[in-house]
Amino acid sequence: MRKIKTIFERQNGKVINVFVEPLQFELQRAKATEKLDGMNVRVTVRNGTCVRLEKRRNPDKIQKHKGIIEPWYVDTAISSEDKWLNDALVNTDLSQLPDGEWSGEALGTNIQGNPLNLPTNRIVFFTLNQAPVFENVPTTYEELKVWLPAQKSKYGNDCGIEGIVWHCENGEMYKIKTKDF
């Protein structure tokens, strides 16, 4: 798993008006989806049944010092720490998922403070295009700075959006969060 790059360079924790790569044309042709605020998970499915639930693990400071910068997945456990991830899995219909490993976002009442105001825990799968699409998303620094805080979530209940993820034609993904500005 690779981290999704933020579209702008950062300085002192905030984005600045410099693209990380020459992106503007690519972003204009990409599909823009709502960035859902939850916990990244991966579900392994066999015959419509989950055989493995994993959660994202980010490198700690020591690992980053050793050059490990990309996150990876670790198994969840039947424990209080992973209770709500397991609950999200139970509340998610896996019948449309073929055998394989599927990444998604665990969301809901007990996950990340429930910023989407959802009534239950569940998993939204990226590969099934379950994240809402936004049309005509601006791609310049100044436009996004104004546009993002004004958007309402298409997935959540009476709340703003965390951000946007662009899915480019070449398979790359880029993101921007409202709080980046």
Image (cartoon, rainbow, N blue to C red):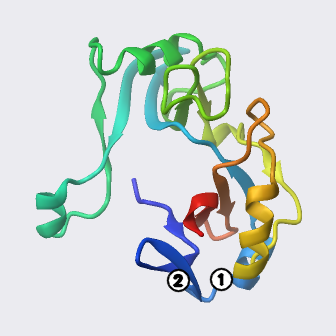
- Tell me if residue 87 can be seen: yes
User: Tag 2's secondary structure?
Assistant: loop
- x and y percentages locating residue 178 in the rendered image: 64, 59
Question: Depth check: 177 or 34 in front?
Answer: 177
Q: Residue at x 81, y 45 (%)?
A: 152
Q: Amino acid at mark 2?
A: Val
Question: Depth check: 97 or 30 in front?
Answer: 30
- x and y percentages locating residue 114 in the rendered image: 58, 29
User: Cα distance, mark 2 to mark 1?
Assistant: 8 Å
- Tell me if residue 140 can be seen: no
8 up-or-down from 37: above or below: below
The extreme right residue here reads: 136
Q: Which residue is mark 2?
A: 20
90 up-or-down from 36: above or below: above
Q: Amino acid at mark 1?
A: Leu
Counting the numbered discs, the total is 2
Check if mark 2's residue and mark 1's residue have beta carbons within 8 Å.
yes
171 up-or-down from 115: above or below: below
57 up-or-down from 66: above or below: above
Q: Residue at x 65, y 58 (%)?
A: 165
- x and y percentages locating residue 109 in the rendered image: 57, 20
Question: Depth check: 95 or 3 in front?
Answer: 3
Residue 93, located in which quarter of the rendered image? top right
Q: Is residue 159 left or right of residue 46?
A: right
Q: Which residue is mark 1?
A: 23
The C terminus: image quadrant: bottom right
Q: Is residue 68 left or right of residue 174?
A: left
Q: Is residue 66 left or right of residue 97?
A: left
User: Tag 1's secondary structure?
Assistant: loop
Question: Depth check: 155 or 126 in front?
Answer: 155
Residue 140, located in which quarter of the rendered image? bottom right
